[in-house]
Image (spheres, rainbow, N blue to C red):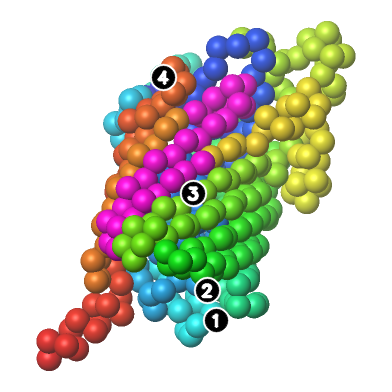
Amino acid sequence: MKKLLFSMAALAAMVMPVVADDYINPIITAMPSLTIAPDAHAAGMGDIGAATTPDMNSQHWNAAKYAFIEERGGICATYTPWLRKLVGDIDLAYLTGFYRFDDKQAISASFTYFSMGKVGLIDNTGNQFQEAHPNEWAIDVAYSRKLHEYVSMAATLRFMYSDLNNGTNSSVTGKATEMYPAWTMAADISLYYRQPIELPMGTSYFALGFNLSNLGGKMSYDKGEHSNFIPANMRIGASYEVAFDNYNRLMASVECNRYLVPSQKSKYASGISSATDEMEQKYGWDPTSEEFSKVSSAKGWWQSFADAPKGAKEEFDEMLWGVGLEYSYDRKFFGRVGYSHEAKYKGNRRYVTFGAGFKLSIVRLDVSYCLATASTNPLDQTMRFTLGFDLYGIKDLVNNRK
C-alpha cells in the first residue's frame, strides 16, 4: 500500500471495486469501514441482520433485538482479514457485549477498529518522506426496551474517529493537501417486531426489523474547510423462522438498505475528472466540492431520496439487497448461505456467502466465507471469524463446580 495519496475516493475504494463502464456514480463517505459487516453470523447470510434471530452481534444491525435475546449477558469478538486479494495488512476487529436487566430491557456496547496497514506518505515531488499507519475506530452504547410483547425499540450513541495519516503532513505540500484526524458523534434508532406463531411442528417466528444508523454530524480532515458525510444508512428487513420438529429449524430473511447520503455527481464516465456540459445538461447540476461540503447532514438525509442524476431508476439502484437462509439443528449447529447485490455503477458488490457455526453452553463460534460473483470484486474470498461467550453460562458453570 505504498505511495498512496490520501483522499476520500481512495478510502472508498477499499470497500468498493472499480467498475469499467461509461457511468460510475457510487456514494462516497467518510469512514466507509462502518458499512462492513463486522460479524461472521450476519456475513454468512449475505450481510443481513436487521430482522434475523437476536444474537450477541445485534448491535451493528439492530440493537432493539437485544430486548428479545435469550442469554442474560455475553461478549463477542470478530476478526476479519480484509481485501486479502489486494493487500495483506488491512484488518477489521470488532468487539461487542450486552447485559439484559430483565425480560424487557438491555444495554449493549461495541468497539470497531479498522486498520489500513502501512502506508507511504509522499510529497508533491513524488518522494516518500514518512510511513503512517492509518486507522479508524468507533465506540458506541445502546439501550433497548420492549414496548409491547412483540415490539422493542433501541437508541444508540456512537463516537467515530478517523486518522488517515497519523497527523503527519509534508512541509512542502502546502495547506491545500494537509490532512488531520477527524471525529464526530452519531446515533442509531431501531425497531424490532418478533411474533411467535404456534404450529403443530413447533413454535415458528415472524420478524420485522428497521434501523436508521449513523445519524450525526459530518467529518472534516482539514480543520473545517471541507466536510464529508458519514455513512448514514436506512436498513429494513424481514424474516420467517419455521420449525420442522423439536430439533430442525429453517430461517429465511430478506433485507434492503441504502445510504442516506446525497450524490455528489462529480463523475459521469471513467477517466473523466469533471462532468462535461453535455453530461451536466443530461443529468443535472454538478456541484463543486466546496458547494457539496456545505450541505448539512439533515438536509443530506432528505436530499438523498431525490438527487440521483438518472432519476427514479438510479434512486432504486442505490438500494443494496440481501437474502439469506439459516438452518439450525437443536439451536446448536448452524449452516448458512446468502447473497448480496449492489447495482453495477454504485459499487458492483455482488457475492454469495457461506457460513457455519456451533453453540455450546457457554461458547459460540461462527465462520463465514465470501465468494464474489462480479469479476472485479476485491471482496472475493473474504473470511470472518467470531467467538462469543455467554457470561452467565460461565458463572453458572463455575458455581456448579464449587
Mark nearer the N terminus (2 vs 4): 2
Q: How crowded is mark 2: few (under 14 residues within 10 Å), some or many (20 or more)?
A: many
Q: Residue at x 66, y 24 (%)?
A: 25
User: Of the residues tagged 3 and 2, which is closer to the observer?
Assistant: 3
The three-letter amino acid code for the residue at tag 2 is Ala
Residues rendered magenta in the picture:
323-350
Q: Residues within 10 Å of mark 1 (few under 14, many from 20)?
A: some
Res. 171 visible in picture: no
Q: How crowded is mark 4: few (under 14 residues within 10 Å), some or many (20 or more)?
A: few
Mark nearer the N terminus (1 vs 4): 1
Query: In front here: 313 or 268?
Result: 313
User: Of the residues tagged 3 and 4, which is closer to the observer?
Assistant: 3
Residue 127: mark = 4
Residue 104: mark = 1
User: Of the residues tagged 3 and 1, which is closer to the observer?
Assistant: 3
Which residue is under mark 2?
Answer: 67
Marks 3 and 1, how far apart at CA: 26 Å
Q: In this view, does 101 lie above or below 232?
A: below
Marks 2 and 4, how far apart at CA: 55 Å
Q: In this view, does 185 lie to the left or right of 59?
A: right
Which residue appears farthest toward the bottom when viewing the image? Answer: 402
Res. 389 visible in picture: yes
**Element type where label 4 sits in the image:** loop
- Quadrant containing the C terminus is bottom left
Q: Does the magenta stretch include residue 327?
A: yes
Which residue appears farthest toward the right when viewing the image? Answer: 281
Q: Which residue is drawn at 54% across and 32% down?
A: 341
The three-letter amino acid code for the residue at tag 1 is Lys
Residue 365: mark = none
Give x and y (percent) for residue 134.
Answer: 42, 40
Give x and y (percent) for residue 265.
Answer: 74, 25
Q: Is residue 285 left or right of residue 109?
A: right
